[in-house]
Image (tube, rainbow, N blue to C red):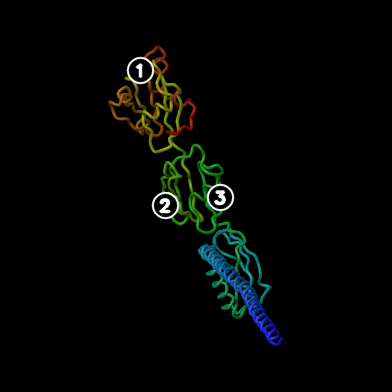
């Protein structure tokens, strides 16, 4: 009986030990489970802070670039500025820069601010207020409400010629895009005249395919005048499929390209009598073209210039219509100009 009791106690003791062991494991797992979410939350918070710092740095860089760009701008005629003096609200005013670059302000009268940056103008006004004894240790703040002088004039072959504002760094294609882009008659020559160097205009030659590169996308500055030239025209008259005038998409068009755009020669064309009529300062000049040999690749293809007239005579009776150079010129001027590109 005693041994049975002893065995029962031993069994209970072992059961209690096992239960205590399992209970300790459960507590440990629970503690680890509570700790992991905390560490995960901490990691997420750390990543969020890093992302926020990166965004803040990007915004600061952007603001710094914008501020640096605006600091390059100079005041000019027509600009409307707003001025305030710290602690002296009576001196707050709006004024427009005159054509001579002067600004009228209370107490200090006229002050020249033309071709000055905002920082330079503020320092100049502060000095005048201090030297005149009007304000002790003045702090002037200026804001430009209208940058009337920061405009670029776009003329020529664009959809909407006019004056467009240029704030910050801008390039040629930016201004042309604001003007509605090039027209179908636009050429590849762009003349840029700078306000401070009008005697030396810059001539830019655009590539034939703008999508292949933007090397001609030059910088423009406020006060510039941009003129987009019209493309040159060559005329094809006589015994061809479609006698017309054709816009030149490049600096030159060859004879074969002009013939192709005109629909080719007719069967009744007299190829041996083909000639180019070119306008010069001494008058019209005629050059005989070996069109038959050019078509058979037995002679080199010849380039044509703007305003050249390629005349292909006919071996039939209607050649009488084109007797003389003057008759050919009259026919060419009456042709429809086609915006076809080789």
**Residue 282 found in image quarter:** top left
Q: Quadrant of residue 29?
A: bottom right
The disc placed on residue 332 is none
Q: Is residue 286 visible?
A: yes
Closer to the N terminus: mark 2 or mark 1? 2
Q: Is residue 81 toward the left or the right of residue 4 in the image?
A: left
Mark on residue 163? 3
Q: Earlier in the sequence, mark 2 or mark 3?
A: 3
| Residue visible at 42% across and 26% down in the picture | 236
Crowd class of label 2 (few under 14; some 14 to 19; many from 20; radius 10 Å) = few
Question: Height in image: 72 above or below 138?
Answer: above
Mark 2 vs mark 1: give the one in front: 1
Classed neighbour count for the residue bearing mark 1: other residues with Cα under 10 Å, few (<14), some (14–19), many (≥20): some
Q: Position of residue 200 (x, y in %)?
A: 41, 52
Look at the image and tell me in which quarter the N terminus lies: bottom right
Pointer 2 residue:
199
Closer to the camera, 299 or 2? 2
Report, in whole angstroms, how far the alpha carbon at label 1 lies from the one at label 3: 52 Å
Q: Nearer the viewer, mark 1 or mark 3?
A: 1
> In this figure, which residue is indicated by the disc labeled 1?
270
Position in image of residue 128 (x %, y %): 57, 74
């Amino acid at each position: 009986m005693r041994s049975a009791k002893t065995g029962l106690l031993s069994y209970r003791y072992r059961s209690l030990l096992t239960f205590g062991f399992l209970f300790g494991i459960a507590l440990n797992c629970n503690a680890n489970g509570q700790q992991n979410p905390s560490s995960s939350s901490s990691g997420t918070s750390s990543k969020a802070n890093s992302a926020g710092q990166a965004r803040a740095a990007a915004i600061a860089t952007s603001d710094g670039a914008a501020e640096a760009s605006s600091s390059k701008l100079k005041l000019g005629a027509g600009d409307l500025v707003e001025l305030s003096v710290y602690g002296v609200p009576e001196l707050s005013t709006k004024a427009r820069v005159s054509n001579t670059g002067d600004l009228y302000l209370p107490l200090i009268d006229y002050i020249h601010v033309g071709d000055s940056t905002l920082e330079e103008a503020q320092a100049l006004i502060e000095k005048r207020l201090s030297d005149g004894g009007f304000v002790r240790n003045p702090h002037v703040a200026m804001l430009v409400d209208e940058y009337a002088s920061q405009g670029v004039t776009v003329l020529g072959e664009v959809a909407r010629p006019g004056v467009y504002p240029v704030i910050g760094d801008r390039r040629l294609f930016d201004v042309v895009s604001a003007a509605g882009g090039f027209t179908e008659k636009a050429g590849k020559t762009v003349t840029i005249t700078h306000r401070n160097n009008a005697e030396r205009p810059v001539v830019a030659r655009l590539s034939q395919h703008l999508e292949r590169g933007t090397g001609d996308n030059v910088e423009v500055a406020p006060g510039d005048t941009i003129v987009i030239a019209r493309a040159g025209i060559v005329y094809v008259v006589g015994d061809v499929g479609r006698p017309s005038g054709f816009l030149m998409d490049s600096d030159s068009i060859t004879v074969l390209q002009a013939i192709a755009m005109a629909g080719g020669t007719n069967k009744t064309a007299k190829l041996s009598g083909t000639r180019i009529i070119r306008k010069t300062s001494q008058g019209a000049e005629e050059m005989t073209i070996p069109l038959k040999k050019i078509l058979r690749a037995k002679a080199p293809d010849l380039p044509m210039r703007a305003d050249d007239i390629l005349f292909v005579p006919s071996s039939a009776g209607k050649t009488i219509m084109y007797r003389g150079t003057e008759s050919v010129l009259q026919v060419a001027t009456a042709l429809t100009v086609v915006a076809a590109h080789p």
